[in-house]
Image (cartoon, grey):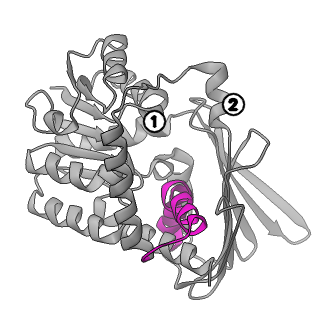
Amino acid sequence: MKIKIGLVGLGEAVQALHMPALEQLRDRYEVTAVADASRGTTDYIAETFHIPHRFYDADELLCSDTVDAVILCSPDAYHAQQVQTALQNGKHVFLEKPAALCLEDLEDMIDVAEKHRDLTAMVGYVRRYADPFRKLKQLLAEDPRPVEYLRCRTLVCEAPFYLKQTRGIFRGKDISPEMISEGKQLRTEQMKKALGENPSDALQNTYTYVNCSGVHILSAVRDLVGSPKRVARSFATNEGKRIAALLEYDNFMGVFEYVNDQSVAAFDEAIEIFQGNRKFLLKFESPYIRNLPVTLEMTETIGLENKKTIFGPWYTDNFRNELIEFANCITNKTSPMTPLADARADLLLAQEIAQKSID
C-alpha cells in the first residue's frame, strides 16, 4: 500500500528537489495534500502536480486524515511546533534540515518523538544517503586505521544560476504581513535562546549558515569520524558568509570551510580524510542538477608510486535515497539512520563555531 504523504512549505526545496524525487517513487508514495502560507503557491503546486487536497494552514494538513506522513520544508522557526503537532496526530515526519534553531526546541521534539515510537521521525541529512558516502563509511569501517587529518568544505552559490536556466521556482507574493511578522518574531526568540541576548547580525548569519547549510557536510563528517572535542579556532568575515573553523579531535585536527557569497556560480563540497599512506576524496555534486555522476577516490602511496582507485560512478539521486529510507522505516517499523536526536551534536557544533568566531 502506498504511503499517503503531505508536503508543508512549498518553496525551492519542494519544487526543485523533493517533488522530482517523489515522482520517481510513485510505487511507494502518493502525494495527497500540500500546504503553504501562500495561497497562490499552494494552488499552483496542487494544480501543477494534480494533488487532491490543499490547505492554507499547515496545522490543518498535519491534523488531516488525508495523509499518513509529512515532509516538512517550512521555515526553520516553525519546525518544533509542526513536528510536535504532526507526531501528536499520528503522522510520520520527514524534517528538512536544520532540525531546529535552538537546543530547547530540538529537545522538545525529541521528547514528543520518544512518546510516539511507533512513528518515524527523521531529519533530511541528504549527503549521508549518497551512495559514495556509504561506500566511504564502509571502507573506513573495514580498515579502521587512525585518521591523521581531515578537510571538509562547502563553497556554494550555484542554485540561482542553475534554476534560472532549468526550472523556475514559483514564489507566491501573498503571505500576510501578520504571518511574516510572526515568523520573524519566532526566529528572533529562538536565536536568542541559541546565541544569547542581542546577538549581532554577523553572529546570527554565521550560525545560520553553519546550522542550515554547512550542517550537511559537518553531519556527514561526524558520521564518519565522530564529533570533535572542541572548536579550537573559528573565523568569519563578510557578515558571517565566509567561515573557517579548526576542529580538534582526540588524535588529529580537521578544517571546515564554508563560503556562500562568492561571485563564481559553482558547487564545491568535499570531504578529504588522510590515514597513513592513504587519502580519501569524496566530492559531492549539486543537488539542483539531478543524477550527475559521483565518484569516491582513494589514493595510496606505496614505495615511490601513488596508486589511485576510483569507486563508482554512481548516478543515484540522494533525495530519492533518503525518501526510500523514510518509506522503509515506516513500512518495516525500523529506526532511521538520522533520527531527531542525531541532530543534537550538529546544532551544538554550529553554536560553538559561531560563538568562537567572535571570541
Residue 175 image point, x, y percent: 36, 32
Q: Which residue is mark 2?
A: 161
- Quadrant location of residue 72? top left
Dots 1 and 2: beta carbons under 8 Å?
Answer: no
Placement of 13 over or under 191, stated as above or below: above
User: In the figure, residue 353 lies in which quadrant?
Assistant: bottom right
**Label at residue 13:** 1
Q: Which residues are magenta?
A: 196-225
Q: Position of residue 340 (x, y in %)?
A: 29, 60
Amino acid type, label 2: Phe
Q: Amino acid at mark 1?
A: Ala
Q: Residue furthest bottom?
A: 250
How many marks the image carries: the answer is: 2
Locate residue 315 relative to residue 5 in the image: left or right: right
- Residue at 56 percent across and 72 percent down: it is 354
Q: Main secondary structure of the magenta part?
A: helix
* Left or right: 68, with 213 as reference point: left
Vertically, is 73 above or below 7?
below
Q: Quadrant of the N terminus?
A: top left
Horizontal arrangement in the rendering, residue 273 relative to residue 315 (left or right): right
Residue at (44% x, 27% y) in the render:
15
Disc 1 element? helix
Q: Position of residue 267 (x, y in %)?
A: 69, 43
Q: Is residue 57 above or below residue 297?
A: above
The mark that comes first in sequence, 1 or 2, is 1
Decide if residue 22 is in sight here: yes
* x 36%, y 72%: residue: 193
Could you say which is closer to the camera, residue 50 or residue 261? 261
